[in-house]
Image (cartoon, rainbow, N blue to C red):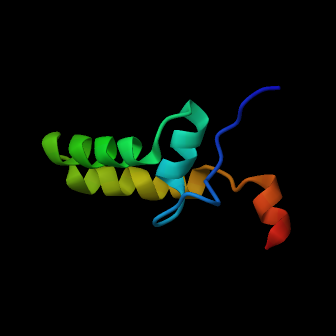
């Protein structure tokens, strides 16, 4: 079965973007969150990191199982 990227419904702090990415790549979500913050700060592109997060929030779909519970 093909893996698909979804917003996490169990591991989310804001919208589930980092949790969903972590589930997709089978890594700890804390690592994804730390990397996201570091790349945004070190790259000098803090506002771009926030805008990319918002874009991912809008683009990445909810998991079908989670959508059925709503």
Q: Tell me: residue 69, above or below residue 56.
A: below
Is the C terminus in the top left, top right, bottom left or bottom right quadrant?
A: bottom right
Is the N terminus in the top left, top right, bottom left or bottom right quadrant?
A: top right
Q: Residue at x 48, y 54 (%)?
A: 55
Q: Tell me: residue 68, above or below residue 27.
A: below
Where is residue 28 shown, x and y percent of the image? 46, 41
- Is residue 57 at all visible to an observer of this figure? yes
In this view of the protein, which residue sits in the foreground, 45 or 37? Answer: 37
Q: Is residue 60 left or right of residue 3?
A: left
Where is residue 43 shown, x and y percent of the image? 17, 39
Where is residue 59 shown, x and y percent of the image? 59, 51
Q: Is residue 2 left or right of residue 10?
A: right
Query: Count the marks: how many?
Result: 0
Q: Residue at x 70, y 56 (%)?
A: 62
Q: Quadrant of residue 54?
A: bottom left
Q: Is residue 42 left or right of residue 62?
A: left
- Is residue 44 at all visible to an observer of this figure? no
Q: Residue at x 62, y 60 (%)?
A: 10
Q: Residue furthest bottom?
A: 70
Q: Residue at x 37, y 56 (%)?
A: 51
Where is residue 22 shown, x and y percent of the image? 51, 41
């Amino acid at each position: 079965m093909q893996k698909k990227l979804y917003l996490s419904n169990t591991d989310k702090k804001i919208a589930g973007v980092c949790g969903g990415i972590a589930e997709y790549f089978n890594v700890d979500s804390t690592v994804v969150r730390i990397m996201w913050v570091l790349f945004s700060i070190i790259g000098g592109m803090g506002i771009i990191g926030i805008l990319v997060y918002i874009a991912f929030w809008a683009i990445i779909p909810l998991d079908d199982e989670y959508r059925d519970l709503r």
